[in-house]
Amino acid sequence: MGTARVVFDRWSGRYAQRMANVRSSAVRDLFAAATRPDMISFAGGMPEIRRVPIENVVAAVTSALRESGPVALQYGSSEGRAEIRQVVVGLMAEIGVRVKADDLVITAGAQQALDLLAKIFIDPGDVIITEGPTYLGALQAFSAYQPRIICIPMDDEGMKTDLLAEELERLGPRGAKFIYTIPNFQNPAGVTLSPARRRHLLDLAREYDIPVIEDDPYGRLRFEGGHALPLRALDDDVIYLGTFSKIFAPGLRLGWITAPKPILAKFILAKQAADLCGSAYAQTTAERYFADTPWRKVLQDLTRAYAERRDTMIASLEEYFPSEARWTMPAGGFFVWVEMPSFLDLKSVLAEAVERGVTYVPGDAFFPDGRGRNCMRLGFCYAEPEKIREGIQRLAEVLEDRLELYRAFAAAGALPAASVTEGRG
Ligand SMILES: Cc1ncc(COP(=O)(O)O)c(C=O)c1O
């Protein structure tokens, strides 16, 4: 057994202030433990990549190199290759958004777009608005630019836009630099912004003249119900982020942004400073894959697999989880959000869960201010259904152990009765 070693950082006085609030990703920290062979992980948001036909990818790589080698291995334009942008034009049209290739920039995943948008919009102390909870990668990207982050609560219809209206009123004209939202199958809450609230959000953004960033990695992974029009389909001023990570493969690090022209011009400058241009090799590979693979069928298979896992997770939660637990019912995507009574600290429960061979991400990772400790994100995307059942059973045992203690205290009048702050089930 290795012993834990405390590493003294003798450069600690040298780092820029902007790194002070960038917290390490709880998910990444868990990766070491999660590699134990018996571990059942609900922590990550990794796609079920085994269902992507590897022979088609090999063919795409081979053809990219054989037929376009000198281009694929060369520097490219900062906007990305015209051919891959044309693929994106088609993808966007299918979800109701009309864009031209000139309105698009290819990025190194949606994550790079988040970082570069933060870079071009945020000065230290600026207010930005997100859902609460929100994607922790966005919190990491934004935090480096030292904003004050205001989180708007959600319910089953997504962000509560009435509360957004109150917040904007409080902040006054041009009080926030932007509103960041994940309208479809939100990470981490799993909820979807209703059509009425989409309209309300856009009306508010117009009234206060605030840019809206729509981050939509999961929109095509819908299990049931009708397709909701993206915000960008309703308003050309919306900044829309897409990604190939969930419809093809995250390993290629390919995403895209469309935004009003002046914003896109600033964005391209920021991208040039960051990496000159994206990988032409990855772009040509994706072009070939989308031209030669029945990718819609692959996506359908993937979505069906995720839906089955969602069903298994929800059924297992109903069967095994303590009666005090509440959870969301995602109609797509990767995640279920579970809320426990407010006195339960799921961060401190995690070590015990890991010991019993199951991981999750404690809810506070998804808030900028330590809230959410009684919540957790469960990813159903990666584990096989039978493992999901077993993992939820293990987790339920850990939670029951903790709750038994609290119930005993509560019965003795030493604690308030279980109270769940948001009634979701
Ligand atoms: C909401 C959200 N935005 C952005 C990303 C980053 O995705 P990409 O792989 O395109 O960088 C993720 C990844 O999980 C995500 O969940």
Image (cartoon, rainbow, N blue to C red):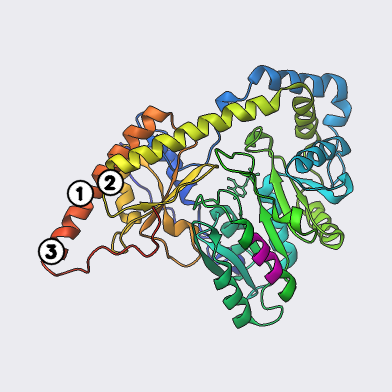
Q: Give the residue at mark 3.
A: 411
Q: Could you tell me if residue 15 is visible in this image?
A: no
Q: Residue at x 58, y 68 (%)?
A: 161
Q: Residue at x 43, y 59 (%)?
A: 364
Say if 109 sits above or below 150 in the image: above
- Mark 1 Cα within 10 Å, few/some/many (few <14, many 20+)? few
Marks 1/2: CA–CA distance:
10 Å
| Beta carbon at label 1 within 8 Å of ligand 1 | no
Magenta region, main secondary structure: helix
Amino acid at the residue labelled 2 = Glu
Amino acid at the residue labelled 1 = Asp
Q: In the image, which is nearer the foreground, mark 1 or mark 3? A: 3
Marks 1 and 2 in Cβ contact (< 8 Å): yes
Say if 89 sits above or below 368 in the image: above
In the image, the segment drawn in magenta is 198-204
Nearer-N-terminus badge (2/3): 2
Q: Give the residue at mark 1.
A: 401
Q: Position of residue 109 (x, y in %)?
A: 68, 44
Amino acid at the residue labelled 3 = Ala
**Quarter of the N terminus within the rendering:** top left
Q: Position of residue 102 (x, y in %)?
A: 89, 48
Secondary structure of the residue carrying tag 2 is helix
Side (left or right) of 301 relative to 307 = right
